[in-house]
Each structure stands twice: as C-alpha cells, then as structure tokens.
Image (tube, rainbow, N blue to C red):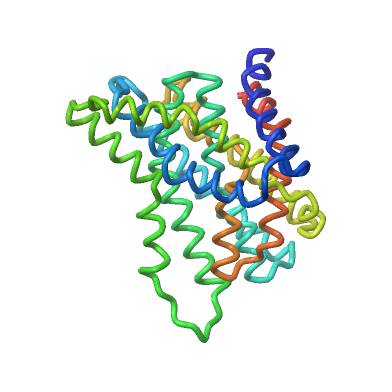
Amino acid sequence: MIAVLAALAPVFLVILSGQVLKRRTFVPDGFWVSAERITFYLLFPSLLITNIARANLGGLSVGPMLIGSLAAIVLVVGGAFLLRRPLHLDGPAFTSLLQSAIRPNVYVALAAAVALYGDSGLTLVSLCMAVIVPFVNAIAVVALVRYASPREQPVRWRQSIAPIIQNPLIVACFVGLLLNLLGIGSPPVVGPTLEILGRASLPMALLSVGAGLDLNAMRVAGRVVAVACGLKLVALPLLTYLSCRALGADALATAIAVVYASVPISVSAYVMARQMGGDAPVMAGTITASTLAAMASMPLILMTV
C-alpha cells in the first residue's frame, strides 16, 4: 500500500504543480500550448522509440494482456450505450460520455508505469498504447460521425481516420518495435540524442496536464461527470483485471494493463469533441474531474487488484 502511494504521489504532485503554475501565470499562457506540442511531437516519441528499441521482449505476456484490455473496452462501450437512454443524453453528449469511458491519458499512464515498475513497466505500457490508442480512437471517430455529425454534411472517413494512423506516439511505438525486431536497438548518436530528449517528456507532459485542468467545467458537465468517472476509473480497470487474469496474463502484464486502464481521460478527447461536433463543455468537465478523482482511485484500484 505504502509503496503504491509513494510511487504515484509524485506523479500527481507534478500535475498539481502545473495547475498552480497556470493559475499564478508563472509563464505566459501561450507557453502551455507550445509545451504540449513539443511533448506530443518530439519528447514522448523520443522516449518511446529508445525504450522499445532496446527492450527485451522475450517472455513478456503480451497477447493475453492486450486481448484482455480490448475485451474490457468493448464491455465498457456496451455499458455506455445502455446508459444513454436513462441519462437522457443527446448525440453530442453521448459521444463525450463514450470518449470519457475509454480514452486514457497516455502521459499519466507512462509516468505511473515507470514510477511503479521501471523500464519493464514502460515497455509493456508502450505496447498497450500502440494497440489500444488506435482502437479507442477509431471507436470515438465512428461514434462522433454517427451521433454528432450533422446529417446534411458528408462524412469524410479518410480525413477522420488519418490522424489516428499519423499519431506520432503510435508511429514512435512501431519505429521502436521495428528497430528491436531487426536487432538494431538504439542506433549510435541518434539513440543517445533521443534518450536525452525522452528524459524531458514525463515532467513536461505532467505539468501540461495540470495546466489544462478546467475546474469550472466540472459544474457545466453535471451528472455525466460522475457516470464517466465511474466507467473510466472503476469499471474499466476492474474489467481489465478480470479479463487479463481469465486469459492467463502474468502478474506484471496484468498490473500494467490495470495501470493503463485506470488513468484519467485523455486531454486530446476534448480536441476531438470540439472538432467533430461532440459536447466539448461536457468533455472538458469529465477530463478535469477524472484527473482529480484518479489521485484517489488509482492507488485504491492498484492496491485492490
């Protein structure tokens, strides 16, 4: 119990530090947009490439972990559909609930995995990300196209799916995996350069997450906040644990899958909601609420399973 709390506390303290810096205008507001962009396109891809390229993938229980994680996501998606009518949600609000239930904040997932399990945790959570991020993004796009897009406008599937394929974090995972499978590992000069850049990724990302919290948006989102947090922070990690164990995943792989499932909602879900007709205020509220609630729920979930 103490070990879990000690490992996760610094992660969330850095997030809260980002909120304090934003409120006190320690840096201009424009800094946070640039920081998030640098992290997304340069720092985090560097971390993923170097870690996966040099990782020892032999003996890892990857298959059951990934299948169990995907199965849990499908179950939670089904639950979101069942809750739409009782909650009286229109199309845009429903898409925001659906995104909230399944889209993880990969920055928090990576930081938590490293804090709890070191390099092995980083490798496994990176593989989770390479498979799960395209899957949940595809679900989100389909839902937004089906339930939030105006009927009179044609659906441009190529423009909707392209961002998923071109996501720099996904590309970085596959580049690192290719280097690993080819036996190249971390290339001279380039590898150490990427390693230096990767060291800056976690603190910069967590500070940006904290700066992006919108406390006022939680009140706007109303009861959807509680339902979204319940699905994302409780139902999804518990179902992930049960699915992974049923499929025979080992203890480490199961733990990493649960870590990945238990993190708060992805900040990028707000951007997708705003651009594709979802309920952006609801999305902003659920992101903020889940990030704050995860400070309590993640340690409890990880100590329970």
Of 301 and 21, the residue lying toward us: 21
- Establish if 33 lies above or below 179: below
Is 26 positioned to the left or the right of 245 in the image?
right
Residue 22 on image: x %, y %:
72, 43
Q: Mark yes or no: residue 102 visible.
A: yes
Single out the residue that lies furthest toward the top.
Answer: 2
Q: Residue at x 66, y 57 (%)?
A: 283
- Establish if 236 lies above or below 301: below
Q: Residue at x 47, y 45 (%)?
A: 40
Residue 207 on image: x %, y %:
63, 37
Question: In which quadrant of the rendered image does the C terminus lie?
Answer: top right
Single out the residue that lies furthest toward the bottom.
Answer: 152
Q: Mark yes or no: residue 241 visible.
A: no
Is 211 positioned to the left or the right of 37 in the image?
right
Which quarter of the figure has residue 296?
A: top right
Which quarter of the figure has residue 48?
A: top left
Question: In which quadrant of the rendered image does the N terminus lie?
Answer: top right
Disc count in the image? 0
Residue 189 on image: x %, y %:
26, 26
Residue 38 on image: x %, y %:
48, 44
Is 88 positioned to the left or the right of 45 in the image?
right
Q: Residue at x 59, y 71 (%)?
A: 277
Of 73 and 283, the residue lying toward us: 283
Q: Residue at x 24, y 29 (%)?
A: 180
- Establish if 48 lies above or below 229: above
Single out the residue that lies furthest toward the left.
Answer: 182
